[in-house]
Amino acid sequence: MVSQALIITNAQGFHMRPASVFAGAMAKYPCKVLIRFNGNEYNAKSPLNLMAACMKCGSEIELVCDGDQENEALAAAAEMIRNGFGE
Amino acid sequence: MLKGTGVSAGIGIGKALLIEEHSLEYTPVTITEPQAEKERFNDAVKTFCENTKKQADALRISAGDKEAEIMLGHISLIEDPFLTGEVEKLIEGGQCAEAALEQMCDMFISIFSAAEDDLTRQRAADVRDVKAGMLGVLLGIEDVKIGDAPKGSVIVVRELTPSMIAEIKKENIAGIIAETGSTTSHSAILARVLEIPAVMSVDDAMLSIRGGDTVICDGSAGVVIVSPVEEELKEYEAKRERFVREKAELDKFRGKPTVSADGIRYELVCNIGKPDDAAKAVDNDGEGVGLFRTEFLFMDKTSVPTEDEQFDAYKKAALILKEKPLIIRTLDIGGDKEIPYLGLEKEDNPFMGFRAIRYCLKYRSLFKTQLRAILRASAFGNISIMFPLITCVEEVRAGKLLVDEIMEELRAEGIAFDEGIKVGIMVETAAAAVIADILAKESDFFSIGTNDLTGYTMACDRGNGNVAYLYSVMQPSVLRMIKRTIECAAREGIPVGMCGEAAADPLMTPLLISFGLTEFSVSAPSVLRLRKNIASWTKERADEVAAEAMRLETQAEIKEYLSSVIG
């Protein structure tokens, strides 16, 4: 299992498009991908979960990957979040 | 006979086609073969995605990329691995696909509805749409497609949505009847653009009309007649003919200048919302564009439109209009619109809040991008810049200063633009009308926005049924605002136009001529009617009518008087 603390940087947080793009990208990895935020765990492969988490710009989250290709998944996820999904 | 509001003139006679919203009720059953039920669910997902993809493609053409992208988002919601996983678990537990789907969707609907931020709350509506669409597929309910309506159909619907209008094939639809909506609703505006007779706010239309009934839809009078008798049918066929003939009569004013009976020349231009609408202005013989709303550029996007994107749009309109004037209004938007990337917060009172010029002067880089794009486009036509929602002279000065700065930059970069570009303002607040004498010294022109001016002067939201009776441009207060604005403009020798709905109202024409308006900016289909109307007035007669109207003390008296004069 690998994990990393990150801060959400895009202005609107995980709204529809970023949530779909991010979950879609995570779905390609066989490992579990979770986001810990506000004491809860959210399935990062689910856009609905990501939107329900109500993460905003500036929210501090922990990204957790567990299973095959966990390092690759973590690196890709961290990169997307740091870039603010290109917005 | 059913009564409603005529929102798009003309007579339509045809067969009723009811667009039903289906009941999505079902009886939950216990599942004994979960594998088969899961397959049924997955097949439904596949069908739903195919349908949605098709709708998105159609929307992309008719309504733009933003609408299409929202539809495509629905696919990622139904394919959500968490959602489908949980639905499958529920099915394994013995629930039918409908019940399992509904339970999971309702869970997210309640989570999203309870969210603090508006954007997340709006996602509840998306999940609701997905649920309805999926239940429709699972229950085998086919949508009635407006696009497939046979020739001579009169559409009967509870609420006409812009996306329905987008599907309509104009040549097949004789008329539109809706239970909700008014003259100013978006779909009514679209109906007028398509020149389809339409009556809205017809109570119980869906109950009173059966599919296949012969109906007369009188969009001029706001009347619907179901299963007319022979005489009625004849009467309305004659009316339809007369309407068509009058239209031909108006065509005689095509290609002619706009002049009063005593030879005073006026400018008669159009309001447009997209570059392509400039072509409609030209088709309808508009002499240019008095108001180009730029909001569309920002609404149809998921991020701020770039300078080049904006430049292309403005240039396109300018090229269509050739040497004809094109007044571009800078971004007029506030908390009442959902444009996620602008970071506009929902306000308790968006129309008095952080919007239009106020927003632009704070977010200067966004404003600068737009002004740069307009200035660059000015090399390709006869473009002017117009600032919305001005309430004090500092706003005009700040805007003009920014324009000067950008001109300096463009000169330094060797980029062409119109050095003589005019910068004017909207007079649409009571504040601006009252200080029109001050503003006229700083502006190259005025354009009176009567819709907002009426609302702000009367402190009245016309969408609120309890106070809508106050909303009238013929209120003595509003008429005085207009008169004062025009007189102040005349004193400084600057042109003054009007781009609200009142500009096209025949009752207002004598007043506007008498006050000294120089430019009328109206929707494209109103051009010829107004030109004909202006040609029937002399300044002398208009002055008499205006003097009497301004002497009267109530809106009702003024309206009655003007109606009696104009007939």
Image (cartoon, rainbow, N blue to C red):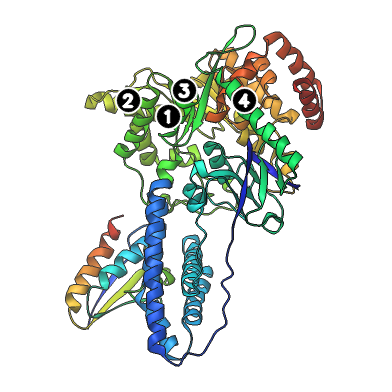
Horizontally, residue B194 falls left or right of residue B213, namely left
Host chain of mark 1 = B
Q: Is residue A39 visible?
A: no
Pointer 1 with pointer 2, Cβ within 8 A: no
Mark 3 and mark 4: Cα distance apart in space: 26 Å
Mark 4 and mark 2: Cα distance apart in space: 51 Å
The quarter of the picture where residue B70 lies is bottom left
Residue picked out by circle 1: B279
Q: In front: B465, or A54?
A: B465
Q: Of callouts 1 and 2, which one flags the residue occurring earlier in the amino acid sequence?
A: 1
Task: Determine the residue positioned at 51% across, 48% down.
Answer: B165
Residue type indicated by callout 2: Met
Front: mark 1 or 3: 1
Residue type indicated by callout 4: Arg
Residue picked out by circle 4: B245
Residue B407's disc number? 2
